Image: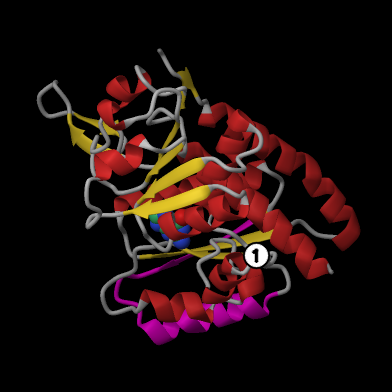
Amino acid sequence: MTAEIINGKAFAEGLRERVAAAVPEFHSASGRAPGLAVVLVGEDPASQVYVRSKGKATVAAGMQSIEHRLPPSVSQDELIALVAALNADDMVDGILVQLPLPPQIDEKAVIAAIDPAKDVDGFHVVNAGRLAVGEDALVPCTPLGCLMLLKDKLGDLSGLDAVVIGRSNIVGKPMAQLLIKESCTVTVAHSRTKDLSDVVRRADIVVAAVGRPEMVRGGWIKPGATVIDVGINRVPSTEPGKTRLVGDVAYAEAAEVAGAITPVPGGVGPMTIAVLLRNTLVAAHARLG
Ligand code: GUN
């Protein structure tokens, strides 16, 4: 079997277009564009690239992008004071503090300072709790993007066996919650899981979010399963001095067995920003009441 390739890039472009098409209605109702504030602390090159992409995508969707860049030496109190100002700013519907933060800053304290109604990352404990009890919540962008791809491919997920590999607060745990809500039978596997290959072999849906290059082998996949690869790992390429991106799944092997699979790049990655724009529009409408 050769798997169907799930084109996350195309799906993300469609979602971005749908969000952009819905912005004028918000504008008419509120007299302003939805606003997304992104806070970048320090000069981490990867974070700078992400923040630039988020800003561009926000403007392309017809929204207002508000960028704050703070020096790596900024104190936790100064950062929290900025978050408080953004909470109080009526033009700001969404607040995203780019992670990771420098060591002098407690990420949990900063996330806790964000107004849950503006928490477009869905990282605040109030949003995590709402998701866990099945209330309306702002949901973390990457797992919500994975769920959209799964539903687009499979339709009703009810009764399917799903394995989520990884238990992070950003991907693994919210992914499991979303799949439970869809009536899947969910197993959360992680670095201490025994016989991981056997656990994966039972799954109709595999979501890999461990951050270990090509850890999930083709032989572990149940024939016909749907494989969602959240990993983005940079590894040395065969060309000396060059690198390439690989996922957490050994793609070539898995594509021989799976029914459908997301590639890396071009799978889950582009969904994150598209869902961020969607979450910003959702937050903006909710604030209008
Ligand atoms: N750093 C890497 N991914 C993310 C994300 O989704 N949100 C935030 N705030 N920081 C990140």
262 horizontally vs 242: left or right: right
221 horizontally vs 147: left or right: left
Residue 78 among magenta residues: yes
x then y, percent, for residue 270: 50, 38
The residue carrying mark 1 is 134
Task: Say which residue appears at 68% left-offset and 60% top-offset.
Answer: 35
Would you identify the image quadrant in which residue 76 lies? bottom left
Q: Under 8 Å from ligand 1: the CB of mark 1?
A: no
- Nearest the eye: 130 or 55: 130
54 horizontally vs 43: left or right: right
Would you identify the image quadrant in which residue 36 lies? bottom right
- The reply to whether residue 56 is visible in this rendering is no
- The reply to whether residue 109 is visible in this rendering is yes
Mark 1 neighbour density, 10 Å: few (under 14) some (14–19) many (20 or more):
few
Task: Say which residue appears at 43% left-offset and 83% top-offset.
Answer: 78
x then y, percent, for residue 147: 56, 44
* Residue type, numbered disc 1: Gly
